Image: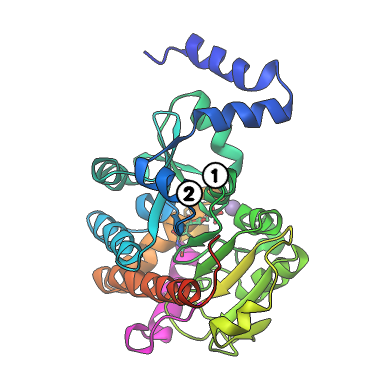
């Protein structure tokens, strides 16, 4: 059905004859919001955006499906509505049903990793796309969702001084006023440079109950957090009407943090392999995540993803209970 001529006419409808504003309106009209998310948005209930590349490319099947379901149920148990975001057959979907989640998880890396720049292509060719943090921020802000929970965000890659590889997650955060809650940045990336770049992008960064910025698997990265938030009350004085995003880094609970040294040596080895095998661009993060997982025993790390998620979710649920943050 999706012949190349119909794909081309879809591209021309989307891009050729209309202004950028009209193109965004057109894209908005293609978006499908699930009944639960739509009801929650219109009645002002809490909605939490969740990305889908972490499901397709960040973890192996079936742990990915299990984690995705667990995260959704944690959000639900706390009275909020989860909105996992992905593009299915060219339709940007805000909120997935069980069957769609299963499809996304089992497709794994065969689904296209979709950052912000890839959205027009995936939509126009009616492809399936798993949204990264940058693309998820775009759709979440389009429908008015204010909070987004994920595991680890993309950042400045090691050797970025040679490769210029800096995740578009950081620039998207710089222009999207959404609060992203994550377990920090994995040490597959250059964490000090990532923090510098977030500063350049005017992203407010705070660690929760810690002076140090966390490194996803471990509570500490060796970098001081730009600021610290100890309670939701601390956060209450902040105004959300800025143009840039906010990054809350919630350290993984102590009992779940895996041995830092083991992960660091696996990371070093995975980075060497990536260079030897000439893995670059958007293939690098999934390659490194998979190799570090393999080298450190897989399942235990996949389980850690859900602990890190839980930490993020409990932080924002706390926020919701104590502040009228959601409306
Ligand atoms: N880091 C992780 N887990 C992930 C990702 C990053 O620890 O799953 C995924 C996220 O979807 C993130 C994306 O938005 O990778 C960043 O990819 P890149 O480095 O190609 O920009
Ligand atoms: Mn990149």
Residue beneath the point at 59% across and 49% down: 141
Task: Tell which of 6 and 20 is nearer to you.
Answer: 20
Q: How many marks?
A: 2
Name the secondary structure under disc 1.
helix
Query: Is the CB of mark 2 within 8 Å of ligand 1?
Result: no
Task: Report the mark closest to the observer, 1 or 2.
Answer: 2
Using the image as rendered, state which of residue 146 and residue 61 is in the foreground. Answer: 146
Residue 55 circle label: none
Circle 2 residue: 41
- The quarter of the picture where the C terminus appears is bottom right
N-terminal-most mark, 1 or 2: 2
Tell whether 281 sits left or right of 59. Answer: right
Check the image and name the residue furthest to the top: 5
Find out whether the residues at labels 1 and 2 contact each other: C-beta distance under 8 Å. yes
Check disc 1: other Cα within 10 Å, few if <14, some if 14-19, many if 20+.
some
User: Badge 1 is on which residue?
Assistant: 143
Q: Quadrant of residue 35?
A: top left
The furthest residue to the front: 43
Element type at marker 2? helix
Which span is picked out in magenta?
250-273
From the image, give the main secondary structure of the stretch colored magenta: helix
Residue 237 percent location from the top left of the image: 68, 78
User: From the viewer's perspective, is residue 182 above or below residue 95?
Assistant: below
């Amino acid at each position: 059905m999706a012949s190349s001529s119909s794909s081309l006419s879809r591209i021309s409808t989307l891009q050729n004859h209309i202004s950028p504003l009209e193109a965004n309106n057109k894209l908005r009209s293609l978006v499908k919001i699930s009944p639960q998310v739509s009801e929650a948005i219109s009645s002002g209930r809490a909605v939490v955006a969740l990305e889908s590349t972490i499901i397709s490319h960040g973890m192996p099947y079936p742990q990915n499906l299990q984690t995705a379901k667990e995260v959704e149920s944690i959000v639900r148990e706390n009275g909020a509505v989860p909105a996992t975001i992905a593009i299915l057959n060219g339709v940007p979907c805000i909120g997935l049903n069980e069957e769609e989640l299963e499809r996304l998880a089992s497709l794994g890396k065969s689904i296209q990793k979709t950052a912000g720049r890839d959205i027009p292509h995936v939509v126009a060719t009616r492809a399936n796309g798993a949204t990264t943090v940058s693309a998820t921020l775009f759709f979440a802000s389009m429908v008015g969702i204010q909070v987004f929970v994920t595991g680890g965000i993309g950042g400045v890659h090691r050797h970025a001084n040679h490769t210029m590889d800096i995740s578009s997650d950081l620039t998207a955060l710089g222009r999207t006023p959404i609060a992203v809650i994550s377990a920090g940045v994995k040490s597959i990336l250059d964490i000090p440079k990532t923090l510098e770049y977030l500063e350049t992008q005017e992203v407010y960064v705070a660690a929760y109950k810690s002076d140090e910025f966390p490194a996803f698997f471990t509570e500490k990265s060796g970098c001081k957090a730009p600021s610290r938030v100890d309670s939701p009350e601390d956060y209450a004085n902040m105004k959300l009407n800025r143009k840039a995003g906010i990054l809350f880094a919630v350290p993984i609970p102590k009992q779940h943090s895996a041995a830092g040294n083991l992960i660091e040596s696996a990371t070093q080895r995975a980075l060497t392999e990536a260079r030897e095998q000439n893995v670059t661009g958007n293939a690098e993060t999934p390659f490194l995540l998979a190799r570090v997982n393999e080298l450190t025993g897989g399942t235990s790390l996949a389980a850690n993803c859900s602990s890190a998620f839980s930490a993020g979710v409990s932080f924002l649920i706390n926020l919701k209970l104590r502040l009228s943050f959601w409306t």
